[in-house]
Image (spheres, rainbow, N blue to C red):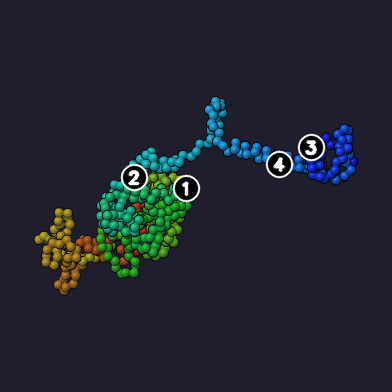
Amino acid sequence: MQVIANNLHFLRIVQKLSIININNSIYDGCHKSGYIKIGNSSIINYILIYNNIILMKNLRLFGFLMMLASSALFVNCTSDPIAGADGIAGTDGLDGLDGIDGLDSTEDCRACHSSDHLEPIKAAYASTVHATGSSWARGTSGSCAQCHSNEGFIDFQEMGFVSAAGQTPNPITCNGCHNPIAGHRSFDFDTDGNDYALRTFAPVSLIVDESVVLDATNDSDPMGASNACISCHQPRHEGPTGLEAEYTIDSGHWGPHHGPQATLVEGIEGYEFSNIGISAAGTSGHSEGSSCVACHMSEGGHTWEPSTPTSVTCTKCHDAKTEVAGFEPDMLTLAGQLATVEGWEYKYSVLRDDSLDPVLDADNKLQFLDANGDITKESSMYVIELDDNGDKITEVVIGAVHSDSPNPGFYGMGATFTSDQAGAAFNYIYLTEDKSKGVHNPDYAKALIAQSIDALQ
């Protein structure tokens, strides 16, 4: 075969490697003619080897150059450049669209805690007997302070008893019913409702019977705010049970006390002669469908004046009614009967003049004598007079109720009547002290009056 070979350097390499013999004549001929004639066919392989050697050298050189270039790039990318001067500021872009206004985080707070909201409430409250009444003087008594003292009320709600510091004559204030320290139970008013930071929503055990628990929670008062009212507006004393033959009215404060509204609404705690006209407890319309706050705060707010009979508060459940039919004339009938019932009391030793008429002190009160005939103010030292046989002397008492108040007798130490007479007197005082003229529970009120009238005839 013939191979074009112009590279004399290659031939010298081949000759030095002694791989083939190159005839000088042939060399000369090749030099002269420019061709080499080779008889050994393996020369092709050596040509390929040589070309590969050259290629590998070139590849190694190329790889080295690539590594060098990459290193230069790496150094350039990771080296901190020297900062140049700031360029000229570009033109401002167009303003974006305004976003939607966010909610005011204090809007719900200001709804109640602003002067515009609070001042009318304070003015309304100042016009009520809660603020101006004289009953707060009883707040110095440990047994009365839980309702007749602002501090006593707070003590009782927080601890279940009244401390010595809580026995004050201070009227209840905003922080009596509301607790500014504990604050709201939840600020999610939309879901949980506004609790107005009320001090208590808990159901209430009656003072006269702790086994009876009242809970004013219903659709008109879903949180049970009226339970704060029930805490105090309930009886303090029970009446006759009907099991005793006689019953003694022992003081001028006898009776359920001045705020039995909660139990009348519930339809309990009256003296029931029978079950005639008496419905199951808690089934009255105002017990199931209304509440203290629904009737006394929907219009009157903190005056606690009841809603007017024509208001939607009333008419959404029944027609407008201005009174409980027959309540007042029937109460007059019962009062007349109670004023004439006859009971008895013991005769006490008191200071008398020569005509045996009692001598009153500067406060127009009887002056009791002890066993030595000396004036005493200790009731335990009072002396009941005896007859010639050594028996205690009794005197007749006329009337179980006078001027809407219980009659404890001339000496004020207790007047005794039959159980039914005392029960009728209890019902009369119960309904009088409730002050709703039967509206809180018309059916129960009318049943108690009717039964009492019948019992005294």
Q: Nearer the viewer, residue 313 or 394?
A: 313
Residue drawn 44% across the image and 49% down it: 186
Whole-angstrom CA distance, mark 2 to mark 1, is: 28 Å
Instruction: Quarter of the image for the N terminus: give it.
Output: top right
Whether residue 211 can be seen here: yes
Whether residue 36 can be seen here: no
Residue under label 4, please give it: 60
> Which kind of residue does numbered mark 1 sit on?
Asp
Q: Helix, strand, or loop for circle 4? A: helix
> Which kind of residue does numbered mark 3 sit on?
His
* In front: label 1 or label 4: 4
* In front: label 1 or label 3: 3
Mark before the other along the chain sequence, 2 or 4: 4
Residue under label 2, please give it: 125
Whole-angstrom CA distance, mark 1 to mark 4, is: 76 Å
> Which kind of residue does numbered mark 2 sit on?
Tyr
User: Quarter-wise, where is residue 447 in the image?
Assistant: bottom left
Whole-angstrom CA distance, mark 2 to mark 4, is: 102 Å
Residue drawn 27% across the image and 54% down it: 165
* In front: label 2 or label 1: 1
Residue under label 1, please give it: 188
* In front: label 2 or label 3: 3
